[in-house]
Image (tube, helix red, strand yellow):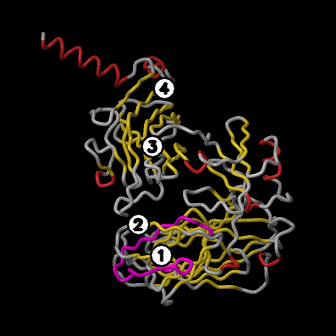
Amino acid sequence: MLSSFIFLAVCFFLYHAVAVFGVASYSVHPCSQSFFIQKLTPKDRTTGKCQNIIIGDPVYFNLNTQRTFNSATMEITYKNSGFNKIMEVGILADARKNYRLQPLDNIILDNLDWSMIEANGVYLLQREKKYEEVAAFLNDATKNDSSMNKQEVLTYFYDLPAMEILPATMSSSVKNKKEIQTIENNLRGSYQFYTYTDNGTFAFHFSFHDLNINKDPDDVVITVYNAKGEVINRQESKDQIGREESRKIIEINDLSIEEQNLNNGFYKIEVAANDDIVTTRISFDKEIVSFINRLWLSSDDQNTSTTLFTDADEMTFSTINPQALQKIKINGDDFDLNQTYRQFFALADKKINKIELTKNDVIISGQGLFSFNQKNLYNLNYHKLSSHTNLDGINYIITTYKPAHLGEWRTKTLTFNLKDAFRYNNNYGFIISIPGLISDDDINDNIEIGDISVKLNGRSLWEKLTAS
């Protein structure tokens, strides 16, 4: 009798794990155990009897499957304490820990009393109604010669095309000038930036040195992309000297990027290098040089202080160097960077925010652009809504998130494409992100997770076996 029960239990488990017909459904409750949907981690960002209350951002969980699927439809029930304005869920996209996020909860949009129109799952919120159709707004927003002010528009999980050329009405203060400018703030590792040409040319010259801390060869690759993302130039400096792990700083070959006969417009330049490489100088002949999302200010910078400008309203600061701990000024207000190996989250409320550091070896990141000179800063992209975006002067928000007025406990459904998701040891990885939720900030804010259910769809076992 017992052996029959065990046999039936094993068959039941294998049936659900293998999903013979290509469909499987799994669910988990806060205090239950599931082989398929695993617990939230890390533990220091969760609390409660069942470790299902999120107190720090982000948290993760794995979905264990014994086979691959094409899609996952996830239903998640949760309660927001009310302090957390944005909540997103994503699936692991690659081995580099990049996630494809989707919006789950946005209290900002839920509570906005603006006019709203919708077309094909795209929602346009207007402070004062001007457009009767989403298509009319998109027509204006995607024309380079449009009279629409880009600063009036926010996007949220909807990508409006980046500008290809500056509007004709743009102030001459951001037009190209002929004099050579330099950046001598040392930058460690990889970075990328936008630039602009209105005369069909540009010239950039990069100087580097090698810290020789890591084992790997210290190659440098510089790639230039046009507005369509196409590669138009690539220069490479191979590590011919070696001396890895010698910790002797040496200069390596300079690299130059010079272009002629270009179409006028924006270009992206990417410097790819490991953390042994420090860029010690960049010289250029263009007015716009706006760094994208992240900079690592090197510790061996001869400058004792650094000033940055950014249009990001949410930023993180971190360092691994105890000598770099300091009070950072953001728009004149002190911000404490007082621990190593920890990300500190900071907010700013101006269109252009000023960051002042007295020491370097600090990694700064944010969803926006950074520059060492305010006149070099220009964002060709429409700004994205974040949890602390100042809506003053904003007249339009375009999004694929559907605003809704729901109760204390909310249940929502998301669908994920699994065909190109990263899978490791039979697991699909998921992230729950609540920007600005910090576990030890003495604010009683949290997200309580209730039930999670997942329905998976893929090829049947027969289709897998007969596939050519």
Element marked by disc 1: strand
Look at the numbered discs 2 and 3 and tell me whether their residues touch, using CB distance below 8 Å.
no
Looking at the rendered structure, the kind of residue marked 1 is Ile
Q: Earlier in the sequence, mark 2 or mark 3?
A: 2
The kind of secondary structure element at disc 3 is: loop
Numbered label attached to residue 19: none
Q: Nearer the viewer, mark 4 or mark 1?
A: 4
Residue 427 image position (x, y, % from top left): 37, 39
Residue 378: image quadrant is: bottom right
Element marked by disc 4: loop
Image x and y of residue 418, in percent? 49, 36
Q: Amino acid at mark 2?
A: Gln
| Residue 458 tag number | 4
Going from N to C along the chain, the mark reached first, 1 or 2, is: 1
Mark 2 → mark 3, Cα distance in angstroms? 26 Å
Crowdedness near tag 3: few (<14), some (14–19) or many (≥20) residues, C-alpha within 10 Å: some
